[in-house]
Amino acid sequence: MEHSYFNSGRIASGKGSKVVIGKWCAIAHNVNIHAITHDPEDATGPEESRGAKVGDIIIEDNVWIGSNTFILPGVKIGKGSVVAANAVVTKDVPERTVVGGVPAKVIKRMDK
């Protein structure tokens, strides 16, 4: 997380998952980065006994993440990408790509 900025929000990991944030990243306020969450396929029984969805989150160098974004387990955000505010990132984001929406979709790819 060298030279990166994380305003405010929440980073959650567990059960062996990890979150890696690269260099020169700008992460705005109220961003939720969750490498572990409840598995929607296992929604029966008391909360503490439900299954978990677990997966590393990798945010590569020079990534910008807008306010109120939610990043789910198992996602890799490629170098130089931008995640628009209020997005829910459920899939990998290729390098130098702008994504946004719920769920996040490609808005544009940036030339090198």
Image (cartoon, rainbow, N blue to C red):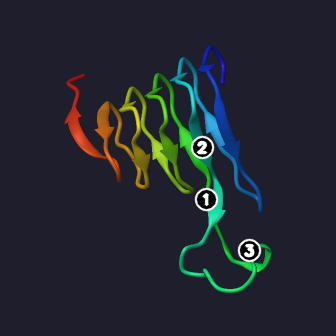
Q: Which residue is mark 1?
A: 55
Cα distance in 3D space between marks 2 and 1: 11 Å
Q: Which residue is mark 2?
A: 33
Quadrant of the image containing the C terminus:
top left
Q: Which residue is mark 3?
A: 47
Q: Looking at the image, which residue is at 58% across and 47% down? A: 57
Specify which label sits upstream in the sequence, 3 or 1: 3
Q: In screen coordinates, is 39 left or right of 63?
A: right
Quadrant of the image containing the N terminus:
top right
Identity, as a three-letter code, of the amino acid under mark 3: Glu
Specify which label sits upstream in the sequence, 2 or 1: 2
Query: Badge 2, how many Cα within 10 Å: few under 14, some, many 20+?
Result: many
Tell me if residue 94 comes above or below residue 65 in the rendering: below
| Camera-nearest label, 3 or 1 | 3
Query: Badge 3, how many Cα within 10 Å: few under 14, some, many 20+?
Result: few
Q: Looking at the image, which residue is at 61% across and 59% down? A: 55
Task: Identify the secondary structure beneath mark 3.
Answer: helix
Tell me if residue 86 comes above or below residue 65 in the rendering: below
| Camera-nearest label, 2 or 3 | 3
Cα distance in 3D space between marks 3 and 1: 20 Å
